[in-house]
Image (cartoon, rainbow, N blue to C red):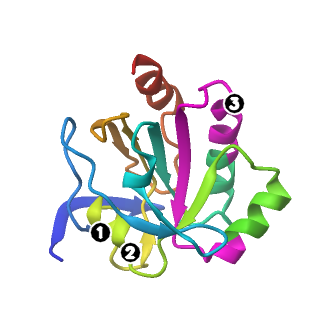
Amino acid sequence: MEDTKVTVTFEGNPLTLTGETPKLGEPAPDFEVLGNDLSAVKLSGLRGKTCVICSVPSLDTPVCDTEVRKFNESATSLGDDVAVLAISMDLPFAQGRWCGAAGVNNVQTLSDHRDAEFGNGYGVLIQELRLLARAVFVVDKDGVIRYIEVVDELTNEPDYEAALEAVREL
């Protein structure tokens, strides 16, 4: 996989993203990741729902913890036809443990650790760390990408309101 020209920083130090970020209005690339119970989860299996996909470096870091908790709170007001996914390279067991400790039950945590299929397919795999960059994608019910934010600095939070507004507009 070729490196993209996109970079993010961690505490100001540049990192290289691999893969290619899809474009607004394009079909969202399908991917397979693992659920907390080790079951395979595919984006195509969620067709018919609007999906908010947030990728985070690790749930065990303060910014990622805050981000997923905020999306968990917002998910209750989005309705049953919206799925909120948080994807990281954390192992599924660690994700399940984190969800239990954090009381997160409105966001589905998913692991890309096995093949980095999501990270490569969405251009958010950090080459130097084999972690995912912080990003938010909104995919409509027909599988088309309607919102993209790749956060420039890993220690910054995404623009929650912009992502949620994109969902509300659908």
The three-letter amino acid code for the residue at tag 1 is: Asn
Q: CA distance from mark 2 to mark 1?
A: 6 Å
- Real-space Cα separation, disc 3 to disc 1, in angstroms: 30 Å
Q: Which residue is mark 3?
A: 76
Q: Tell me where residue 39 appears, x and y as whole percent.
A: 57, 72
Residue under pointer 1: 120
The local crowd at label 2, few if under 14, some if 14 to 19, many if 20 or more residues have their Cα within 10 Å, is many
State the CA–CA distance, disc 3 to disc 2: 29 Å
114 left or right, relative to 75: left
Residue hosting label 2: 116
For the point 52% across and 48% down, which residue is it? 156
Segment colored magenta? 69-94
Q: Secondary structure at mark 2?
A: loop
Q: Is residue 75 magenta?
A: yes
Sequence-wise, which precedes: disc 3 or disc 2? 3
Numbered badge on residue 59:
none
- What secondary structure is marked by label 1? helix
State the residue in front, 168 or 62.
168
- Residue 23 appearing in the image: yes
> Would residue 14 be seen by someone viewing this image from the given angle?
no
Which corner quadrant holds the N terminus? bottom left
